[in-house]
Structures are given as structure tokens and as C-alpha cells.
């Protein structure tokens, strides 16, 4: 692997697995900057199609022939970029190694981009994609024209990558494989810290140590004062909080909630104890108010005028797969969300239930009931948090469980969606587990009713439920 990246403008760059959300963002930025970009991915997606439109050369096959093609007719040896999702046995990777090509991890390329500009890197266990998306959207709205590399599609840009003309860059810093310790941003934003990615981190202490290394690499650190783990273990130059002044730890940036409803939030905004004005956020949920406060705080540290940010805040939209309305199906609203950790599931369900209880909603109409559809993601995560998942999901009136998505992990004895269903039944939950997505999609017709909000959560392939529901409707009409 490359330790020191050299990337002159004439050097071609090739991405193995270019269709991934993180890889495609990097490829898009380089393509916009005039690099000869290519990539391979057996899956065709909107992201890979978007790269083609930006001038990238996309291959479907991952083999020696692709490596031969990218080496042909070039004056400079290509740099090959991989992610942690690419196994060492990948035929294209093996061919690239055999050809003597330089290979680097996507984190090394992102680290190079971060070092090239005045950068904001957003890290933390939850809310990274939303917070980085909001920062980039706000900076763009107030005319500061940032480059953005985000782990989700940003509605304001219609993409997960944006090439700006200014020296500002906003990037999502993923902690899942520890590679964020390579980043040296001007400002590191840390949203919260909680044990996750138990396939990589044996315990919370290991995760804390990684985040401490990241924080030590940042010129300045902005951290969430409402997270006890960050308060205890992370040194920060600036902190934000939703608590009133005098409550909790010292926080320079504060948003004191005035109302939390199903169609958004209102809060008083304070800096160093001085009220600057009221915030009106069109996103529901206390967690989204915290994410928005983090975004505003970061923008303020970059010099953005408060009143411009205050105005821009009212037009914010969450990134793709974050409470993402897919449409209406037989009188039900279907929403897709990436929540795959117990805390995320609890926060997302709480936001959905708030729409029912408050009679106000960001959706086209106010739902009468929430029905959760959840897919456990990874055996290791499900084993670690089985009981916490059960507790979080039991807050929904009804839950339908999709088959566990392994993400390439080997099965663990006794860990399955059926085991989660049993744990939920022990808590008195109304829950069913299904053997495949088609079976689950069919069950939605009988297990849900018009007026329901069908909240689909998970990081695997459960987001395909919407397509299956559409196919069922077409088949019934045929």
C-alpha cells in the first residue's frame, strides 16, 4: 500500500469498486479536476452513471482485462484505489499487484485531498452524513462555494460529491476501519461516540483511542458537549450543546429548544451566552437539531455570517436514505432510513412517533401509526446489541424483520432476525420475521393499513423493499 501519495495532474486514477458511495465521491471530484478517472463495478447504479457523465471510464468486469485496459495508451502508470470492502482475493486487485501498479486505500486519497485545502472533516458514531451534508449545503447557500465529499447524496447538489471554487472542503470521516487517523483537517467535527463496528473495535476504549488520534491531528476540534464519552475523553477547542446555559459542560455554541414537533424544530441560538436569534429547522427530531447546531457552529468557525446561515437553514433537506420519503403505496407512506445501530433506530422511531403524536409532519400528510421494517446489519453488530435493538424496536406498534444482512461476515451461532424477534416478543412486541425480502414485501399488504407510515430501516439491501412494492402493484394491475 502507498504511504505517501503522489498525484500529479497527468496521472490516471482507477477505482476498484467505484460504485460505492465513498469511492464514487472521490472519483467524481478527481474527474471534475481534470484527472483521467476510471473505475470498475459489476453493479450499475445512478452513481456510476453520474461518473460517466463526468467523463469517467467505467468497467463492469473486475479482472486482468480491466487492468490491461487502464494501462494501455497511458504515459504515466495509473494509481489504483481500493476500499476496505475490496477483498484481497479480488481478481482485479491481484492483477494490479502483479502488474506492479501502485495501490492505495481510499482513505489515503481522501487524506491527500483534505491536506490540499482548508478542510472540515466530520467524524463520530452517528450523524456524520447528515452533519457533513448540512455543513456543505449551508456553506454553499451562503456563497462560500465548498468542495464536498459526503457518504450520501446531498439534495442541494443532487450528488455525493461537489467541486467548489473556494479553498474550503467538507468531508465525512468514517471511523469504521480506523483509517480516519490519516486525516489532518483544519477543523474536526465530532458528533458523538458510542461503540459500533464491533468487527473492527473490540471495545469502546479502542474506538476512543482512534478518535483521540483523529482529534490530535486536527488544527481545531468542535465536539458535542451533550455526549458524555466526548466530554470525558476528547479535548476540544469548541463545543456545542442543546442544553440551557449553566446546564452540563461548557459550550460556546448553544441551541435551546423552543419547540420540537413532527414538522421541524425551533430554538434560540446563542454564542458565548449571547442570543443571536431564533433557528427554524425544517427537520424533525432532537438529534437533527443537534446535527444542525453542529453544522452552524462549524460554518461560523469558517467565517459564515449568522443571519445568512439563519436564512439558509429554513431550506435544508436531509441527505438520501436519511428519513427519505420513497412515495405513497396503497395509502401508506414508505420512508427509507439508514439507521442500523440501536441508538439510530431509537432516534428515527422517536422522530416518526413525534409526527403521529404532534399531528405535524414533514411528510405529505400526518401518519396515524408507525410500522417499523428493520434489517439487522452484520452478525457481529447484531450479537453485540441484540437486546438494545429489541428495546429500541419495541417502541414501534408493529415491526417486520427482514433477513439479517451479513455484509460478508460469517454466521454466528444463534444470531439471526428470528433471534431478534424472540427477544422482542419477550418484551411484549408485535413482531414477525421473514425469510426473504419478497415475502416481507408481500406481508406489508396484510400487516399494515392505509394511513400507516412504513419506516424501512437498515444499511443492507432492505431499501429494495420500495421497488418490490412497486412491482407488486404493477403485477396486480396486469
Image (cartoon, rainbow, N blue to C red):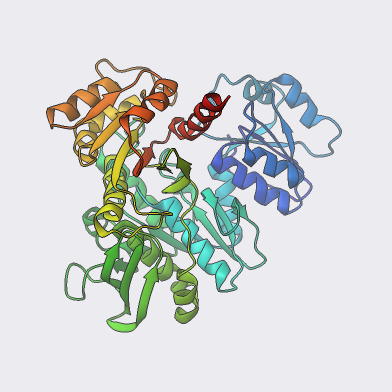
Q: Image quadrant for the C terminus?
A: top right
Which residue is drawn at the image coordinates 56% and 70% (left, top)?
A: 141
Where is residue 201? Give x, y as percent: 32, 35
Q: Is residue 33 left or right of residue 285?
A: right
Nearer to me, 49 or 60: 49
Above or below for 159 versus 70? below
Above or below for 230 versus 249? above
Nearer to me, 177 or 246: 246
Nearer to me, 442 or 161: 442
Above or below for 307 versus 466? below
Which residue is drawn at the image coordinates 80% and 39% (left, top)?
A: 76
Residue at the extreme right of the image, as rendered: 73
Q: Is residue 211 left or right of residue 65?
A: left
Above or below for 402 versus 303? above
Does the rendering let one see residue 214? yes
Quadrant in which residue 441 is drawn: top left
Where is residue 187? Give x, y as percent: 45, 63
Nearer to me, 230 or 355: 355
Amino acid at each position: 500500500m502507498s504511504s505517501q501519495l503522489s498525484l500529479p495532474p497527468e496521472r490516471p486514477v482507477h477505482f476498484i469498486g467505484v460504485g460505492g458511495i465513498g469511492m464514487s465521491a472521490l472519483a467524481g471530484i478527481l474527474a471534475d479536476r481534470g484527472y483521467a478517472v476510471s473505475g470498475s463495478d459489476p453493479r450499475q447504479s445512478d452513481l456510476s452513471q453520474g461518473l460517466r457523465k463526468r467523463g469517467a471510464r467505467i468497467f463492469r468486469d473486475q479482472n486482468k482485462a480491466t487492468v490491461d485496459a487502464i494501462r494501455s495508451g497511458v504515459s504515466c502508470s495509473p494509481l489504483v484505489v481500493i476500499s476496505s470492502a475490496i477483498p484481497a482475493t479480488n481478481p482485479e486487485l491481484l492483477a494490479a499487484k502483479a502488474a506492479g501498479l501502485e495501490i492505495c486505500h481510499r482513505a489515503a486519497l481522501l487524506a491527500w485531498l483534505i491536506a490540499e485545502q482548508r478542510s472540515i472533516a466530520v467524524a463520530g458514531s452517528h450523524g456524520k452524513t447528515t452533519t457533513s451534508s448540512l455543513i456543505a449545503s449551508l456553506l454553499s447557500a451562503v456563497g462560500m462555494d465548498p468542495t464536498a465529499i459526503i457518504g450520501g447524496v446531498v439534495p442541494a447538489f443532487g450528488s455525493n460529491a461537489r467541486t467548489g471554487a473556494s479553498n474550503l472542503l467538507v468531508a465525512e470521516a468514517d471511523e469504521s476501519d480506523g483509517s480516519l487517523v490519516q486525516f489532518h483537517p483544519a477543523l474536526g467535527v465530532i458528533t458523538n461516540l458510542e461503540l459500533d463496528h464491533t468487527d473492527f473495535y473490540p471495545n469502546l476504549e479502542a474506538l476512543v483511542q482512534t478518535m483521540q488520534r483523529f482529534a490530535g491531528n486536527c488544527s481545531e476540534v468542535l465536539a458535542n458537549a451533550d455526549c458524555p464519552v466526548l466530554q470525558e475523553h476528547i479535548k476540544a477547542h469548541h463545543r456545542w450543546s442543546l442544553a440551557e446555559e449553566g446546564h452540563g459542560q461548557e459550550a460556546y455554541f448553544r441551541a435551546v429548544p423552543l419547540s420540537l414537533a413532527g414538522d421541524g424544530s425551533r430554538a434560540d441560538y446563542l454564542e458565548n451566552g449571547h442570543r443571536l436569534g431564533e433557528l427554524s429547522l425544517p427537520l424533525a427530531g432532537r438529534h437533527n437539531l443537534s446535527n444542525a447546531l453542529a453544522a452552524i457552529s462549524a460554518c461560523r468557525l469558517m467565517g459564515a455570517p449568522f443571519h445568512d446561515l439563519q436564512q439558509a437553514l429554513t431550506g435544508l433537506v436531509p441527505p438520501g436514505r436519511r428519513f427519505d420519503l420513497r412515495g405513497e403505496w396503497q395509502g401508506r407512506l414508505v420512508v427509507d432510513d439508514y439507521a442500523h445501530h440501536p441508538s439510530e433506530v431509537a432516534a428515527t422511531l422517536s422522530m416518526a412517533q413525534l409526527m403521529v403524536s404532534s399531528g405535524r409532519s414533514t411528510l405529505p400528510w400526518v401518519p396515524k401509526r408507525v410500522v417499523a421494517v428493520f434489517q439487522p446489519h452484520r452478525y457481529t453488530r447484531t450479537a453485540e446489541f441484540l437486546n438494545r435493538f429489541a428495546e429500541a424496536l419495541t417502541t414501534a406498534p408493529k415491526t417486520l424483520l427482514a433477513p439479517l444482512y451479513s455484509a460478508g461476515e460469517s454466521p454466528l451461532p444463534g444470531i439471526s432476525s428470528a433471534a431478534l424477534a424472540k427477544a422482542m416478543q419477550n418484551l411484549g412486541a408485535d413482531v414477525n420475521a421473514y425469510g426473504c425480502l419478497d415475502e416481507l414485501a408481500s406481508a406489508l399488504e396484510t400487516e399494515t393499513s392505509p394511513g400507516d407510515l412504513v419506516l424501512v430501516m437498515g444499511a443492507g439491501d432492505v431499501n429494495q423493499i420500495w421497488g418490490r412494492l412497486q412491482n407488486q402493484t404493477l403485477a396486480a394491475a396486469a
